[in-house]
Amino acid sequence: IQTIPLQLRNNFKSKVKARPISYSLGTLHKHHTNFSTELENTINSESNFKNISNLIKFVRQHSKWYLDNDCINRHYFNYILLDPRVTNNLKERASQLHLMDVWYTFLRAIFYVGKGKATRPYVHLKNAQKLVDETNNITLVKDPKLALIVSIWKANRGVLIRAFQGISSQDAQTREASIIDALGMNHLTNRRLGFYYGRARSLSDKERKYLGIALLYKLMMKFLAKEEKELFPLKNTKAAMAA
């Protein structure tokens, strides 16, 4: 560090103090992920991360289109399943981390993106619960989502869920598709891509991922606004939904 110009050295020291992550000569080591290129850019460049605020317009435009054209039966929602071993009480730790690190941790923790209504997310937990005491590895391999849920439970941790609520079926399907495209199939346990409806059908592939990135950022804000509540086997689903 002593060979670096004073201004850069001071900048380096201040960043190391504020952001506990490996640096070399003041440069952030890039993360290599299975995310889409567009999403990966936001965790490897501060300017790209800050640009997420400009991507929120895609959510506003998307929401406005559905408010104007699809206001019936808004009983659906999107949800994400997260691994608490990755988040590790992220809300409590966030004040000690740079927001880019919070963002990266949140993204890494997501292992499934879904859409449904009523208690749909808890169907996955019920199916996983049937496998907790079984040794049928073939069944687990067929559904990596269930395998990961069982793995979380066997580590004495619970699954985390966060959701967008009060939207139409096609709105939820479109949001699901854009989030999956942004995160990338190789990162998730989802086994198929989503479908686009409405205004999003005319968006380019890059713009669809921008929509997904903006939605993920909004989900992170919702996630950080509440305490992490882990869901274990035999949890009451109605109580969990209320939480």
Image (spheres, rainbow, N blue to C red):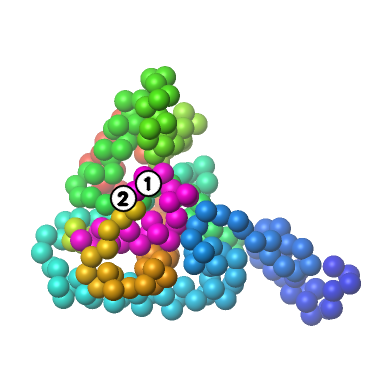
Q: Which picture quadrant has residue 220?
A: bottom left
Q: Is residue 184 left or right of residue 13?
A: left
Q: Quadrant of the N terminus?
A: bottom right
The relative height of residue 173 versus residue 137 in the rendered view (above or below) is below
The relative height of residue 131 versus residue 152 in the rendered view (above or below) is above
Q: Residue visible at 74% across and 74% down?
A: 11
Observer-side mark, 1 or 2, equals 1
Relative image position of residue 169 (x, y in whole percent):
19, 58
Residue 219 appears in the figure: no
Q: How many marks?
A: 2
Q: CA distance from mark 1 to mark 2?
A: 8 Å
Q: Earlier in the sequence, mark 1 or mark 2?
A: 2
The answer to whether the residues at label 1 and label 2 have Cβ atoms under 8 Å apart is: no
Relative image position of residue 91 (x, y in whole percent):
48, 55
Whether the magenta-drawn stretch holds residue 162 is answered as: no
Q: Is residue 174 left or right of residue 144?
A: left
Q: Which residue is mark 1?
A: 190
Q: Amino acid at mark 1?
A: Asn
Relative image position of residue 27 (x, y in whole percent):
72, 67
Q: Which residues are magenta?
A: 170-192
Mark seen at residue 114: 2
Q: Secondary structure at mark 2?
A: strand
User: Dot 1, how many residues are within 10 Å of its Cα: few (below 14), some (14-19), or many (20+)?
Assistant: some
User: Dot 2, how many residues are within 10 Å of its Cα: few (below 14), some (14-19), or many (20+)?
Assistant: many
Residue 36 appears in the figure: yes
Relative image position of residue 217 (x, y in whole percent):
43, 65
